[in-house]
Amino acid sequence: MYRDMIVFIAGPICSGKTYESDILADAMNFDHVEISTIVRQLLDTNKRNELQGHPELSTQIIDRIAEIKRTTRRQGVVVSGPRQVEILKAFPEAELIWMNTPLDTCFERFYDRKDEKDEEWHRDTFEEYVKKDNDLGLQEVKQYMEKEKI
């Protein structure tokens, strides 16, 4: 059954995207999909360094989201973690949420969680990940989301 409702939640690394997406999806009876999970499936890897830096995956990510949206048996889909604005533009009807979490808080969460996909948990490593996300287009995602909310 085709569902029209889709919500994108974006923000910097460790900003709370997954946490908030889980809560929202549960409350609204939506599926929750993380873009990083889609990318892991497409690239068959779990290492952040190998996942970041593939903007050419956007079309495949869009196709996968459209498939999930089309086949969900729930009321809609919450998608967390877009890094390319073209993903958002492919779903102009979507609701958009930007996680405006201070980077110092994001770093504290990054350091505290010590996720296995992150090989090191230093400030320099965190800043490198932030830079890679920005290189992929995260700031354009933020600007697009803020512009669309006006």
Image: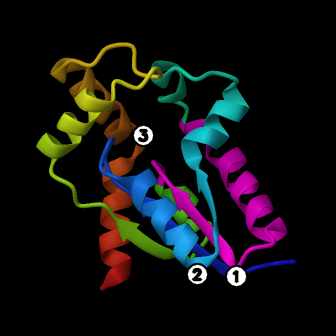
Is residue 31 found left or right of 14 in the rendered image?
right
Q: What is the distance, in whole Å, between disc 1 and disc 3 at their CAs?
A: 27 Å
SS category of the residue bearing label 1? loop
1 vs 2, front mark: 1
Tell me the residue that label 1 is attached to.
Answer: 4
130 shown above or below 79: above
At 61% across and 46% down in the image, what residue appears? 58
Q: Position of residue 128 (x, y in %)?
A: 27, 24
Res 131 visible: no
Between 10 and 121, which is closer to the camera in this rendering? 121
Q: What is the distance, in whole Å, between disc 2 and disc 3 at their CAs?
A: 23 Å
Tell me the residue that label 3 is attached to.
Answer: 136
At 50% across and 55% down in the image, what residue appears? 80
**Quadrant assignment for the C terminus:** bottom left
Q: What is the distance, in whole Å, between disc 1 and disc 2 at their CAs?
A: 8 Å
Q: Which residues are magenta?
A: 55-84
Give the residue type that dot 1 points to: Asp
Between 86 and 81, which is closer to the camera in this rendering? 81
Q: Position of residue 145 (x, y in %)?
A: 37, 69
Rendered image: mark on residue 77: none
2 vs 3, front mark: 2
Give the residue type that dot 2 points to: Glu
* Pointer 2 with pointer 3, Cβ within 8 A: no
At 38% across and 79% down in the image, what residue appears? 148
Is residue 5 found left or right of 8 in the rendered image?
right
**Quadrant assignment for the N terminus:** bottom right
Q: Earlier along the polypeptide chain: callout 1 or callout 3? A: 1
Q: Earlier along the polypeptide chain: callout 2 or callout 3? A: 2
Rendered image: mark on residue 93: 2
* Pointer 1 with pointer 2, Cβ within 8 A: yes
Query: Crowding at label 2, few (<14), some or many (≥20) Cα neighbours within 10 Å?
Result: few
